[in-house]
Amino acid sequence: MPLAQERLAKLETLTPREMEVLQCLRNGLSSEEVAAKLFISPPTARFHISNIYVKLDLDKVRRGSVRQRELVKYLELLGKPSQVIASDRQADIVSVPAPSAAVLAETSAETRALDAANLADNSTDQHAAPVKRPPQLKRTLAFGLAMMAAGALLFVIIPRIFSSASPLVPLATVTNSAVARIAGATIAPTRSSELSQVESANASKNGLCGESKRIPLSDAPRFLQSQGISLFTPENTDGAVLSNKVRVVLGDETGVWIGFHWTDQSPRSGLAHYDRIRREWAVCALTSADATRNINDLALDSQGRIWAATEHRGVAVFDQGAWRNYTVADHLPSNDTFGLTIDSNGNLWLATWEGIARFDGARWDLIYSVENGTLVSNHVHHIAFDSRGDIWVAYIHEGVSHFDSVQGQWIHYNTKNSALPGLEGRRILVRPANDKHSEEIWVATADGGLGVFRDGEWSAQNSANGLPSNHVNWVTLDSFDRVWAATTQGVVYFDDARWTLYHNLATFAISFTKEQSERCPPPDYHVWTATIERGLSHSRIPLPVTTLDVLAVKYFSVDGQELAQPLALKPGEKFRVAVTVRTRAPYRLQEGDALMHCDPDAQDRFGAFQHMIPPKGQEIEPGQPVTFTDFDSLFTAPALPAGVAEKTFSSNWQVWLCTRYTGPVIPITFSVKQ
């Protein structure tokens, strides 16, 4: 391939926004000037510039003067009237690595709280009606004018892009014979079968989801010691994690499927899979008529096919080596789709903005809607079936409906006619009956916590009962019959007695995967959470039994003398801590286990190292006492602020056993006197 054509091919991988940034670079603007001109933040401008360098193979060029000369050669092509650059082509997300951590600012540091304003914006999860995103259209038109000025007439038809945090603007009702409406923009009728042929031609016939290559896990995920979880982000996965805004996760036999939403800081969306066994990623070639594909829900059917409910783009399925897309042209009631549910007969049910559709393997049918007198609102977010086969419906703004097969009628619940705590339904969990409780229906709401329907009555689980937030995005059940809830203030689980905090990151969704473990006696379960602004999180499921007992916490002076408790020290005085624990059979302490500091602020270690390990070379059997201590990194009593005569300090620690925190939090407490 001639060099000029090769460069043109690389230019075609740029997104419309990156082409705008490239035009600014062509005019000699700095990153700050690019940000000002395009009304974006400087970090976002640098992000786009870094992506441009990667796509044009300039990221490895270290000398600025050489990079600039190479960039000029690309810029010269933009001015040639014989060439037309297709700016509306979707970038190949498989081959584009994420920018380096030096380019992207850390979205949220371990030692500070999440930004409340960003959280409020990012936690909105597309439950308002779709509306257009005018800035995207404006930017695309601006790029078209730039191409015309260069002598090349560029015709760009870009579907309108919608903001996830937009005000409520209802869609027009879409009938089965209506002109196809993609993302709310009326275009010439295009059967989804035609779109499917295009997508099938572009998708790989091999692979898990049409990926062009597998991306090995190169960097270790970021470990948040205070939370006991690992974070996979665009920065530490070579771009395989497409965005820090993960909308949904779904575990399978080898790993987990991840659906993303784009943000200004992470302007990519789509679908990926992480193979935990092979430790590699697949970024799915889920192509569409536009450059974004926000994923709202995922489902795996009995044939092993992955289904994706998308924002503004209908439903996609990877079948026989290619992606097939279903839209209103295939009798979907709406292209805005939210929840996917597979019933006991293998039928796929879809919650949409215009009612509930069902796919029987051959065609979609609108089953329930306001128009046929079954629903109180067409805006449905999730569907579930109980043990009787009754259908439960969570509305985006109107509470819950239940078809009672015994009475043969629909029953509608809201906050006025029942004790349902919220109207903004997000997810439904059917908790099967056992010897401790009858069957329960749990409904996650964004405005009232969790509603629990048991024995014909509603009750509430909310912040008054221990939830970190009443904005609940997800509810699910683990293998130990514990209810898990994902909220905008963290993830918690419920053992029928109390809620326990799992982590405090704002979260959309939760999924579990299972493996056999030689290290830990019961089957080992992995917990995956879709965080709203920190990427994909992973850890092991909290063990359901008491694994160890804390026998003693003692304090010693530098010369080894045991100090009396409560401990009172002078500023600057050093001391050592010895914590003795005993595991319960069949658990045992092994290499890799430790007593770890679990406060978010590293300053709370007061000079001590972040963990203490068991004595090396010692075989520790279940039930055998073992003492954690550190003779090298001692605690140091801090200086007191001016005017303060005495103050108490505390440092929290917990045992890391079987690659997860277990047992009680152990406080190291002392007072300091002037």
Image: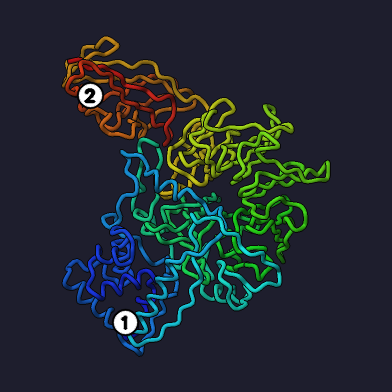
Residue 453: where, in percent of width, then height?
Answer: 68, 35
Amino acid under label 2? Phe
Residue 311: where, in percent of width, then height?
Answer: 55, 60
Quadrant of the image for the C terminus? top left
Residue 616: which disc?
none
- Depth check, front residue: 199 or 559: 199
Which element carries disc 1, helix, strand or loop? helix
Quadrant of the image for the N terminus? bottom left
Is 45 rendered above or below residue 117?
Answer: below
Q: Mark yes or no: residue 175 visible.
A: yes
Q: Mark yes or no: residue 317 visible.
A: no
For disc 2, the marked residue is 635
Q: Residue at x 26, y 70 (%)?
A: 58
- Depth check, front residue: 190 or 194: 190
Q: How many marks are shown on the rendered structure?
A: 2
Amino acid under label 1? Leu
Q: Specify whether 323 is left or right of 630.
A: right
Q: Specify whether 496 is left or right of 620.
A: right
Crowdedness of circle 1 by 10 Å Cα count: few (<14), some, many (20+)? Answer: many
Q: Residue at x 65, y 44 (%)?
A: 399
Residue 216: where, in percent of width, then height?
Answer: 39, 58
Is 329 rendered above or below residue 541?
Answer: below
For disc 1, the marked residue is 78
Q: Specify the farthest residue to the top.
A: 564
Asked which quadrant contains residue 11, the reply is bottom left
Residue 33: where, in percent of width, then height?
Answer: 25, 65
Q: Which is nearer the N-term, disc 1 or disc 2?
A: 1
Asked which quadrant contains residue 265, the reply is bottom left
Q: Residue at x 43, y 27 (%)?
A: 588
Is 646 rendered above or below residue 131?
Answer: above
